[in-house]
Image (spheres, rainbow, N blue to C red):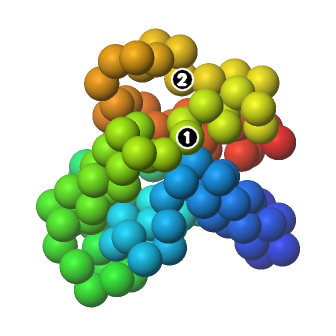
């Protein structure tokens, strides 16, 4: 994917997260956007989130992989508990129905869903 398209997709990721209620001041916000962008560059990273994706994001931000994982998990919890995850249905015509009224999706499930939808959009 060329740089222009990648930047457009990165903007789409940021917009969706903000529409769902995640604010840029939350530490997991840039981590999540970067994780999505890295997966858009190479989809195989979705298969290696713990061993490839988190360490790459951590390196970019000068953090540790477990800090990245925790910050993304907290960001998803904020969206699920206080935000508007239903925006996914409005935006993409599909929602994470598996988790409707239940616990939040895992980091991998959430990132995978957004990467797939943003890549197809």
Seen in the picture, residue 57 relative to 72 is either above or below; the reply is below
Badge 2 or badge 1: first in the primary sequence: 1
Residue sitting nearer the eye, 4 or 101: 101
Residue sitting nearer the eye, 2 or 14: 14
- Residue 8 image position (x, y, % from top left): 80, 66
- Give the side of residue 11 with respect to residue 20, left or right: right
- How many angstroms separate mark 2 from mark 1 (CA)? 12 Å
Q: Quadrant of residue 40?
A: bottom right
Q: For the residue carrying disc 2, how many other residues have a C-alpha within 10 Å: few (<14), some (14-19), or many (20+)?
A: some
Q: Quadrant of residue 115?
A: top right
Which residue is the site of mark 1?
A: 84
Which residue occupies 61% across, 31% down? Answer: 86
Seen in the picture, residue 97 relative to 80 is either above or below; the reply is above
Q: As drawn, which residue projects farthest toward the top?
A: 98
| Label 2: which secondary element | loop
- Give the side of residue 1 with respect to residue 98, left or right: right
- Residue 52 image position (x, y, % from top left): 33, 56
- Give the side of residue 50 with respect to residue 110, left or right: left
Mark 2 or mark 1, which is nearer to you?
1
Which residue occupies 27% across, 86% down? Answer: 62
- Give the side of residue 69 with respect to residue 40, left or right: left
Residue sitting nearer the eye, 90 or 2: 90
- Residue 12 image position (x, y, % from top left): 73, 58
Residue sitting nearer the eye, 51 or 94: 94
Which residue is the site of mark 2?
A: 96
Which residue occupies 53% across, 54% down? Answer: 21
| Label 1: which secondary element | loop
Q: Check the picture and name the quadrant holding the C terminus.
A: top right
């Amino acid at each position: 994917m060329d740089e222009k398209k990648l930047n457009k997709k990165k903007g789409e990721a940021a917009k969706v997260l903000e529409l769902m209620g995640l604010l840029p001041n939350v530490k997991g916000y840039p981590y999540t956007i970067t994780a999505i962008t890295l997966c858009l560059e190479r989809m195989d990273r979705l298969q290696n989130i713990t061993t490839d994706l988190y360490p790459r994001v951590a390196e970019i931000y000068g953090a540790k992989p477990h800090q990245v994982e925790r910050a993304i998990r907290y960001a998803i919890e904020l969206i699920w508990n206080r935000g508007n995850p239903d925006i996914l249905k409005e935006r993409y015509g599909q929602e994470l129905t598996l988790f409707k009224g239940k616990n939040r999706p895992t980091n991998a499930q959430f990132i995978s869903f957004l990467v797939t939808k943003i890549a197809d959009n």
